[in-house]
Image (cartoon, rainbow, N blue to C red):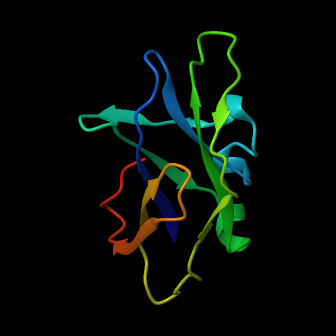
Amino acid sequence: MAYVSWFTIQHEVAYGSGLWVVGSCRCMGSWNVYEAHPLQWRPGHVWSCRVRHQDECVFDGGFEYKYIEWHRHQDDAPQWESRQNRRLELPAEDEAHTGTRVVKTNDRWDSDFTIREFTLFPPSYVRE
């Protein structure tokens, strides 16, 4: 069974900057900002991206992650969220179901507020 996460956060950034998400497992960049996943901006300062998880994230039961604000094309250092690391727990696999588990997160910058939604889709629903 595959896992896909949709990371979403609302945050206004400085002109020319963007948001990235980075985390503790290899598919989340192993805390390396140069391996972080860029989020795409939408009206209302809503940022989101999709990450397909590798087995190590699933077998470890989840991973930690944070958002960073960064003007990547300049030499500025990224601005990390000041809060503690977030943790996304991935539910154990259910051998009776095949398909893709989609985990949607809705976070707020520097806040403990998070909404998570877990959904199971048939194998053909989520494309590579």
Counting every numbered tag in the picture gives 0
Report the front residue among 76 and 122.
76
Q: Residue at x 51, y 64 (%)?
A: 3
- Where 74 falls versus 78 (above or below)? above
Query: As drawn, which residue projects farthest toward the left?
Result: 43
Q: Where in the figure is residue 81, as x and y percent of width and height?
A: 62, 44
69 vs 5, left or right, is right
Q: Residue at x 56, y 81 (%)?
A: 93
Q: Can residue 100 be seen at all in this image of the molecule?
A: no
Q: Where in the figure is residue 127, as x and y percent of width and height?
A: 36, 50
Q: Where in the figure is residue 53, as x and y percent of width and height?
A: 58, 57
Report the front residue among 124 and 22.
22
Q: Can residue 65 be seen at all in this image of the molecule?
A: yes
80 vs 128, left or right, is right
Q: Residue at x 56, y 18 (%)?
A: 71
Query: As drawn, which residue projects farthest toward the bottom?
Result: 96
